Amino acid sequence: MATRHLYLARHGAADAFGELTGIGHRQASLLGERLANVPVEAVWHSPLPRAVASAHEIARHLPDVPVTEAAELVDHVPYVPSAAETPPSWAGFFDGYDDTEAASGQRLAEALVARFAKVPDTTAKGTRPDTHEVLVTHAYQIAWLVRHALDAPPSRWLGLNSANAALTVIEYRTGLPPTIVMFNDMSHLPTDLRWTGFPEGMRP
């Protein structure tokens, strides 16, 4: 049975210009330490600077593992819900999104799923039945992949937030639905580095 292990991580804490902060570097480094004993064979990252820097910080603990940009991991709104699908707390959030922007975001979301949310191809020469890949991306993309794994309605990505450098793991096995092994796990971070990326009122 072939299994694809995806280790999803939101980038470390960033400043208002989208650059990784000192805290963000520490968070990403600690995540790299956590993943050091996993047989990771690839680190993929969003094109945005905060994700690029986080991926390279993580990769310092993963010698000889290639670090590669994946356009599908870029930060974007994966699905703009209809008014009937939108929870009251999200009312107004999607104001200004026109049909063109919504369609573009949905195409990117579909490309993300098509590329990563599947069992590994074991027919290619040199491939192994099990793969372990780290995806350094953004909160909305993690939410979209979790929603897809649960086979939930498209609008259910709303409200699935991820903290900076938190770890979510999804496994894809031949002939079985995806398995969410963990979601938004921060056990590798000390208390003072947890829950960044969440609004103050939403932090435990």
Image (cartoon, rainbow, N blue to C red):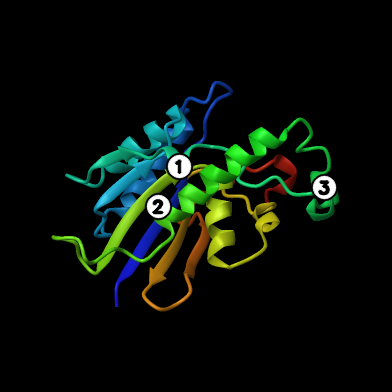
How far is the residue under mark 3 from the one under mark 1?
A: 28 Å
Q: Residue furthest top?
A: 17
Quadrant housing residue 27: top left
Residue on which the image places disc 3: 89
Residue at x 45%, y 31% (from the top left corner): 50
> How far separated are the C-alphas under marks 1 and 2?
8 Å
Q: Amino acid at mark 3?
A: Ser
Q: Nearer the viewer, residue 54 or 84?
A: 84
Disc with the residue nearer the chain's start (1 vs 2): 1
Tell me: 193 left or right of 117. right
Q: Which mark is residue 115?
A: 2
Task: Name the disc covering residue 72, or none.
Answer: 1
- The image position of residue 105, as x and y in percent, is 59, 40
Outermost residue to the left:
126
Q: Nearer the viewer, mark 3 or mark 1?
A: 1
Mark nearest the camera among 2 and 3 is 2
